[in-house]
Image (spheres, rainbow, N blue to C red):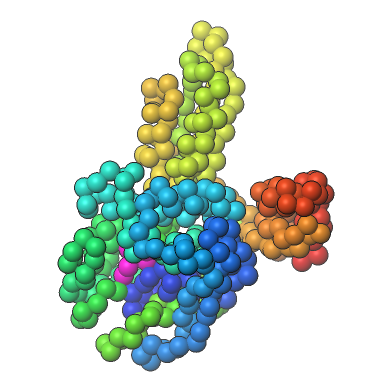
């Protein structure tokens, strides 16, 4: 199984995370550019360059290609979530990116004492910051890896923000990093950005112990920050490790998720689709409805929700607010998932993303992205079924 350990030699930011992943050959750059372009703000390109920071050379990245009319530093959380909802991102990538913005939004809401729905991102509302989060979500979902990280270095001093002069780490970053081991670095600089801190919290939520396993190094990648620091190399390092695994574990990933369950017999059936939509908007991984017989022979609906443990309370609150249930059962369950990757294939109608699942090194299944097929059918007049079959055929040749 693949495990990625993050060494924060000089801190972490969203662009450094992406750069390290590219340097470690973990990213299909063309597929990621296609995903970013689906946000609807332009034909996005990832520009990489080889640079040196202190004693270490690595990859530095920036984005190009968006419509200048879309460039601004300030966006509301609701605006960004709507951008993600209407994008052509893979469902898992979309949910992960929304989770990260929700995490940052909740911290901003708390430290500035404002309602979550009115959170107004400043620097993190700029397009390159949005691309950072979407890129991180893409990397997390397509690598299928487990993660760990070193202690988090923090700088010192103050920085100027739209909220005035604030200490380093800035208040939202400090809130997000609660529970992390921090180490002081003698430098007057912000080493961990809110974006970088949010990515770390997301990864730790997938692996609560956040421990580095005993494993063999297969690849190393270095992501370079923009600034040159005199005191140390401003880079983040990815150690890509292969853990010992045999049998089924060799091509599976495992994680622990929360399962929320309730039975309902007194709610109008036509309301359930809106409840499901709200659950997915709030980060649910899966929502299932099934008919059940309840006490006194009444017919009802069992609603089951899978989510990441960090999202449990928020999704339970959705069930309480949006349904008639008086109680929600919560349990932790382990998931086994096939190793997977996203292929970008060409059909007669255009480009389609295909999710491929592996076991024991063999392809077991492939599923074209339905939204891609539907969009191309609308654009070309080709039947959806024909595009779907073409995409399967193209994926089989990879």
The residue at the point 54 percent across, 71 percent down is 65
Quarter of the image with the C terminus is bottom right
Above or below, comparing residue 45 to residue 330 in the picture: below
In which image quadrant can residue 209 be found?
bottom left
Question: How many discs appear?
Answer: 0
Residue 85 seen in the current view = yes
In the rendered structure, does residue 50 fall within the stretch colored magenta? no
Where in the figure is residue 334, as x and y percent of width and height? 51, 46
The overriding secondary structure of the stretch rendered in magenta is helix
Where in the figure is residue 44, as x and y percent of width and height? 56, 68
Q: Residue furthest bottom?
A: 55
What's drawn in magenta, residue-wise?
Answer: 192-196
Where in the figure is residue 58, as x and y percent of width and height? 47, 84
Tell which of 279 and 336 is nearer to you.
279
- In the displayed structure image, the side of residue 16 where residue 177 appears, left or right: left
Q: Residue furthest top?
A: 296
The residue at the point 26 percent across, 58 percent down is 172
- In the displayed structure image, the side of residue 189 where residue 77 appears, left or right: right
Above or below, comparing residue 176 to residue 294 in the picture: below
- In the displayed structure image, the side of residue 86 where residue 313 appears, left or right: left
Quarter of the image with the N terminus is bottom right
Where in the figure is residue 67, as x and y percent of width and height? 51, 66
The residue at the point 46 percent across, 45 percent down is 283
The residue at the point 58 percent across, 58 percent down is 38
- In the displayed structure image, the side of residue 395 where residue 342 appears, left or right: left
Residue 373 seen in the current view = no
Tell which of 274 and 361 is nearer to you.
274
């Amino acid at each position: 199984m693949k495990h990625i350990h993050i060494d924060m030699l000089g801190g972490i930011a969203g662009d450094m995370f992406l750069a390290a992943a590219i340097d470690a050959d973990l990213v299909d750059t063309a597929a990621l550019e296609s995903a970013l372009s689906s946000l609807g703000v332009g034909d996005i390109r990832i520009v990489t360059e080889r640079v040196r920071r202190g004693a270490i050379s690595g990859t530095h990245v920036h984005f190009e290609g968006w419509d200048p009319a879309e460039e601004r530093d300030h966006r509301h959380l609701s605006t960004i979530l709507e951008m993600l909802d209407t994008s052509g991102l893979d469902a898992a990538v979309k949910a992960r990116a929304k989770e990260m913005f929700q995490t940052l939004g909740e911290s901003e809401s708390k430290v500035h004492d404002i309602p979550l729905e009115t959170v107004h991102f400043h620097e993190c509302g700029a397009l390159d910051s949005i691309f950072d989060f979407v890129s991180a979500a893409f990397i997390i979902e397509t690598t299928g890896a487990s993660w760990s990280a070193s202690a988090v270095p923090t700088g010192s001093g103050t920085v100027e923000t739209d909220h005035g002069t604030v200490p380093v780490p800035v208040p939202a970053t400090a809130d997000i990093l609660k529970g992390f081991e921090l180490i002081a670095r003698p430098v007057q600089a912000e080493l961990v950005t809110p974006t970088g801190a949010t990515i770390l919290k997301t990864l730790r939520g997938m692996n609560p112990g956040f421990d580095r396993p005993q494993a063999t190094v297969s690849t190393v990648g270095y992501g370079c920050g923009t600034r040159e620091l005199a005191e140390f190399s401003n880079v983040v390092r990815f150690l890509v490790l292969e853990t010992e695994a045999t049998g089924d574990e060799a091509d599976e990933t495992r994680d622990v998720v929360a399962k929320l369950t309730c039975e309902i017999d007194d709610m109008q059936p036509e309301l359930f689709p809106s409840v499901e939509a709200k659950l997915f908007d709030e980060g649910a991984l899966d929502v299932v409805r099934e008919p059940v017989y309840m006490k006194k022979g009444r017919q009802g609906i069992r609603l089951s929700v899978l989510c990441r443990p960090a999202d449990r309370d928020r999704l339970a609150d959705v069930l309480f607010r949006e349904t008639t249930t008086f109680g929600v059962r919560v349990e932790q369950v382990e998931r086994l998932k096939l190793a997977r990757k996203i292929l970008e294939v060409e059909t007669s109608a255009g480009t389609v993303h295909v999710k491929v699942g592996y076991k024991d090194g063999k392809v077991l299944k492939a599923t074209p992205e339905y939204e891609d097929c539907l969009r191309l059918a609308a654009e070309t007049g080709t039947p959806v079924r024909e595009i779907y079959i073409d995409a399967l055929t193209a994926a089989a040749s990879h």
